């Protein structure tokens, strides 16, 4: 893509009343679908009400960047969210006006009221002139394609042309849901606004003021570029700071701008749609995936700088196609890392099920920073045996670094990224090399780990990462100390979720050691009892446990009671195995 500045055409300033009358707009295939949620729509309504109340004289609604295609239509490069919202609002106020007319005006003999009814008909006629029906709509939100029906366009047409059944239709498409929600909220606000007036004529007047404020006091600046490439470049110039759009939206625009002819754009857009579908076409998820990929291949980059970083290096059609190819190749693995066990296809991704089990433990502990390392290994076609070795090492590093020592994540994020792109660039060429690099760069020392563990406290919890972190620590410690659980550890503890955390002694018994790891037990759920708050009451149930560690703990409590010294002793016993496990 050219790096020189593009001469930006003289912008045209439109009132909403004229914008749709003077132009036909089309959302290109490669644009994201309608994404405005409740917050954006509420801001729209708030700005409009400021005009109606006289707090402002006009409102700048934003910019639109387009270029005129071969059919004479304005293809929208930037601004389709505003145009779609504007069309939905016009439909909402038309439908509210129609309802008032049918409920209050039609059939009336009141001359003044009939005259007010003319205002309602004028609103309907102006909206119909702007929206322009099905044959020649002013806005097409989904172009026709040989590979896809115009499902979204059909829904948008029905919603904005008074087909009322679509307002209550149950939907599974996020863009349709966004459109439907925006319409329904606008109708509710309009009704609430006019019902604040006491008489019918005052209500109609209020609706007319709202309509006039939108049509005549909302302004759009439109830049119609001489070519598609110029439109792409203007869009990036205006949006590259990523204030309103996520990095993935701007990156997609950049990739499409490099594709050249329409055939390449079509192919690139189809590829983008395939790789983003597993990410639910969600801009946040897509951005995180691209950032993870870039961390694996190149370096870790803060999200606000991601677009600039990528656009500098991806600058021609070949690099753009290679970039999309890499993303499409790696997105299946990324979705597995995000959810290792569900759906079943994720569970079956690796033939070696121990890999999935390790990834699931990492997921339950809310660990994501390691993703670049595995992306690089899978991209470079490492064996599953090697991937499992490295995954276990990554888990050990996290446990030492974050769970036991409680150091920050910056070192891990940067370190995992550095090692990942060394794998990608073949600076590390074997599993032994990777593990040696992980040990040297990121594995805390044995003495530091043992010292931190000796006073380690965990609050536990009934769900989430806090719970799973302590469950995992205790399960591994039980297995190392007393040969409990064994190969069934993952199956019994995680898959079947058969154990519950039990705080053995209360504060009166153990003082400030109440949250020490040594004061926690892992007990089968069938033996857990509500209302027990002291160690001696737990002892009979610990004795019933199949875990030898619990049986020995019960004997200790029954013989000598349970005090702070007992907690310290048990924690010290655990610490003998910490650096052997992790």
Image: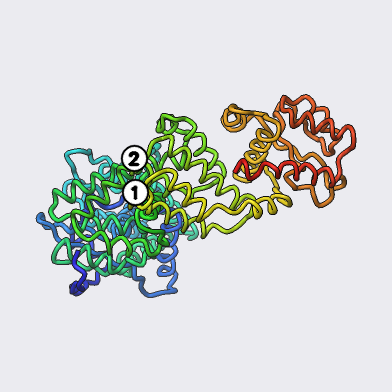
Residue 381 is tagged as 2
Q: Nearer the viewer, residue 406 or 465?
A: 406
Residue 319, position in %: x, y? 22, 55
Mark 2 residue element: loop
| Residue found farthest to the right | 560
Of callouts 2 and 1, the N-terminal one: 1
Residues at marks 2 and 1, CA–CA distance in whole angstroms: 73 Å
Q: Would you name the residue on which mark 1 appears?
A: 106
Horizontal placement of 418 versus 255: left or right? Answer: right
In this view, the mark in front (2 or 1): 2
Residue 123 in view, yes or no:
no
Viewer-side residue, 241 vs 204: 241
Q: Residue at x 24, y 64 (%)?
A: 65
Q: Can you give x and y, in whole percent of width and height, for residue 173 in the image?
A: 36, 41
Quadrant containing the N terminus is: bottom left
**Which residue is more in the foreground, 242 or 513?**
513
Q: Quadrant of the C terminus?
A: top right
Residue at point 13%, 48% (across, down): 263
Are dots 2 and 1 in contact, CB under 8 Å? no
Answer few, some or many: residues within 10 Å of disc 2's Cα (few below 14, many 20 plus, some between 14 and 19): few
Q: Position of residue 563 (x, y in %)?
A: 86, 44
Mark 1: few/some/many CA within 10 Å (<14, 14-19, 20+): few
Q: Nearer the viewer, residue 221 or 118?
A: 221
Q: Secondary structure at mark 1?
A: loop
């Amino acid at each position: 893509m050219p790096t020189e500045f593009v001469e930006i055409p003289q912008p045209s300033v439109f009132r909403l009343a004229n914008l749709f009358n003077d132009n036909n707009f089309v959302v290109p295939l490669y644009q994201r679908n309608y994404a405005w949620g409740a917050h954006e729509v509420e801001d729209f309504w708030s700005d409009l009400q400021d005009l109606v109340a006289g707090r402002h004289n006009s409102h700048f609604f934003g910019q639109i960047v387009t270029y005129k295609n071969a059919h004479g239509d304005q293809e929208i490069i930037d601004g389709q969210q505003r145009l779609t919202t504007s069309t939905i609002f016009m439909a909402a106020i038309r439908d509210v006006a129609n309802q008032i007319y049918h409920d209050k005006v039609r059939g009336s003999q009141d001359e003044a009221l009939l005259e007010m009814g003319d205002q309602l008909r004028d609103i309907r006629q102006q909206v119909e002139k702007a929206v322009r029906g099905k044959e020649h709509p002013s806005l097409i939100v989904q172009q026709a394609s040989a590979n896809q029906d115009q499902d979204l366009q059909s829904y948008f047409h029905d919603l904005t042309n008074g087909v009322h059944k679509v307002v209550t239709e149950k939907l599974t498409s996020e863009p349709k849901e966004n459109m439907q929600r925006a319409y329904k909220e606008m109708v509710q606000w309009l009704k609430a606004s006019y019902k604040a007036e006491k008489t019918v004529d005052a209500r109609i007047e209020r609706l007319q003021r709202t309509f006039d404020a939108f049509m005549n006091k909302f302004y759009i600046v439109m830049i119609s570029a001489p070519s598609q490439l110029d439109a792409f470049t203007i869009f990036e110039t205006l949006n590259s700071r990523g204030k309103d759009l996520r990095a993935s939206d701007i990156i997609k625009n950049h990739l499409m701008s490099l594709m050249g002819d329409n055939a390449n754009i079509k192919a690139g857009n189809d590829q983008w749609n395939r790789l983003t579908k597993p990410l639910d076409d969600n801009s946040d998820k897509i951005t995180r995936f691209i950032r993870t990929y870039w961390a694996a291949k190149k370096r870790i980059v803060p999200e606000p700088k991601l677009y600039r970083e990528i656009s500098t290096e991806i600058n021609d059609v070949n690099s753009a196609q290679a970039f999309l190819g890499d993303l499409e190749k790696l997105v299946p693995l990324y979705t597995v890392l995000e959810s290792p066990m569900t759906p079943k296809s994720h569970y079956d991704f690796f033939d070696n099920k121990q890999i999935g089990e390790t990834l699931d433990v990492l997921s339950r502990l809310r660990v994501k920073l390691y993703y670049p390392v595995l992306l690089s290994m899978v991209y470079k076609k490492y064996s599953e045996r090697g991937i499992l070795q490295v995954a276990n090492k990554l888990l050990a590093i996290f446990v030492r670094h974050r769970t036991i020592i409680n150091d920050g994540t910056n070192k891990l994020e940067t370190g995992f990224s550095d090692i990942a792109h060394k794998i990608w660039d073949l600076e590390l060429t074997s599993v032994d090399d990777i593990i040696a690099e992980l040990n040297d760069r990121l594995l805390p020392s044995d003495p530091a780990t043992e010292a931190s563990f000796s006073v380690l406290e965990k609050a536990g919890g009934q769900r989430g990462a806090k719970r799973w972190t302590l469950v995992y620590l205790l399960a591994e410690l039980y297995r190392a100390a007393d040969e409990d659980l064994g190969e069934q550890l993952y199956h019994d503890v995680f898959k079947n979720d058969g154990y519950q955390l039990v705080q053995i002694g209360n504060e009166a018994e153990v003082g400030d050691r109440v949250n020490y790891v040594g004061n926690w037990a892992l007990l089968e759920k069938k033996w857990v009892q509500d209302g027990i708050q002291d160690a001696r009451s737990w002892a009979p149930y610990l004795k019933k446990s199949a875990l030898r560690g619990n049986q020995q703990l019960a004997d200790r409590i029954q013989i000598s009671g349970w005090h702070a010294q007992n907690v310290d002793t048990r924690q010290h016993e655990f610490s003998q195995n910490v650096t052997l496990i992790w």
